[in-house]
Amino acid sequence: MPIRILTFNIQNGQPWIDGDPFTSVMDLDGVAHFIYEQGADIICLQEVERGFDGGRQITPPPNYGRLREMLGSYDSVFSYPLQNDTEIPFGLGLAIFSKTPLRDFQKIDLPAADIEFEFQGKMRKASSRLLIEASTTIDGRDVRLMNTHLQAFFMIGSSSDAHPEQRNFIEQRLKLHSGRATILAGDMNSAPEESIVQQFADVGFHTAQNAEITWRRRPYIVDHIFFNSEFVLESCRVIHTDVSDHLPLVANLEFR
C-alpha cells in the first residue's frame, strides 16, 4: 500500500476569500475537516498558529490543540520557531501528524539572514526559521519525516540564492539521513528563479511535483514534498480548496 503524504500551509485557519485576501475570518475547524477527509498517513502543516506583531507566541498553542482534538487518531508533534521581537504578523509554527506513532523528535532552528526591511512603517529583522523532524515505522520500515517553513526572501527584496544558509542547513540534514527512507515536506517559499529544487535534487531528494502553482497570492510553486531513492512516486496532485491561501499537495509514495 502506498504512503499518503499531505503538506499544507494552513495560514493559521484563515480561509481564502476572493476580493478579501486579508480577511479577518478564521475557520480552523474547516481546515481540520478538510485535512481529515484527505485520509493521509502523514500530515505536515505550516503556519499552524497566528503570528503577532512583535513576536508574541501563545502557549499552549491553541490551534495545534484544536487540531489534535479533531485529528484524534493521529500522533503529533509541534514547535514554534525562535521568537523575533520585530516579527511580522503572519502565521508560524510547524506540526507533523502521523497515523503511526512518532519518536525521536527534533526541533532545529535555522539561522536568520542578516537583513533588515520595512513592513507597516517599522524596520524589521529577518526571522530564524524552523525544521522539525520525527521518525515513525510504516510497514516495518523506519521513515524519517522532516517539515519546514523557510524565509520568503522574495517578500523582503532578496532571494534564497543570495542568502542560502537555511537551505544549506537543510541540505546537510538531508545528507545525514540519506541512508534511510526520508521525506521532507513544507513551504520552501521559493521564487521561480531560485534554485532550491535543484539543490536538493543534487543530494538525491526529488520533488513530487514542480509544475502546478501552490500559492494564490503569486503564481509560485512554494510547497513541496521531497523524497529520496528509498521511495517511488506513485502519484501526486495539488488540491484546489479555499480553506487557505496555499493549495495543499498530496503525494502517494511506495517503498522501493
Image (tube, grey):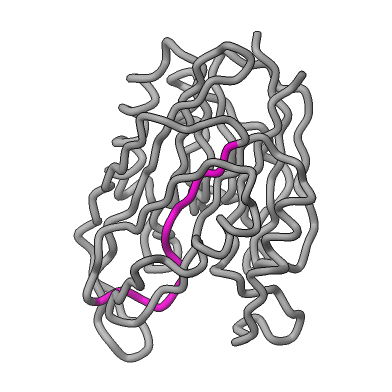
Q: Position of residue 134 (x, y in %)?
A: 42, 33
Q: Residue at (33%, 54%) from the top-left corner?
A: 129
- Picture mark count: 0
Report if residue 94 lies within the magenta region: yes
Q: Residue at (60%, 20%) from the top-left corner?
A: 138
Q: Residue furthest bottom?
A: 121
Give the extent of the magenta segment. Answer: 86-98
Q: For the N terminus, which image quadrant?
A: top right
Q: Position of residue 170 (x, y in %)?
A: 35, 35
Tell me which corner region of the image, top left, top right, bottom left or bottom right, holds residue 59.
bottom left
Which residue occupies the foreground of this view, 19 or 97?
97
Q: Main secondary structure of the magenta part?
A: loop
Q: For the C terminus, which image quadrant?
A: top right
Which residue occupies the foreground of this view, 90 or 118?
90
Report if residue 2 lies within the magenta region: no
- Image position of 92 (left or right of 35): left
Q: Residue at (67%, 75%) from the top-left corner?
A: 27
Q: Position of residue 240 (x, y in %)?
A: 80, 57
Q: Residue at (64%, 60%) from the top-left corner?
A: 246
Tell me: residue 179, above or below residue 143: above
Tell me: residue 233, above or below residue 60: above
- Image position of 105 (left or right of 245): left
Q: Position of residue 191 (x, y in %)?
A: 52, 53
Tell me: residue 180, above or below residue 150: above
- Image position of 134 (left or right of 63): left
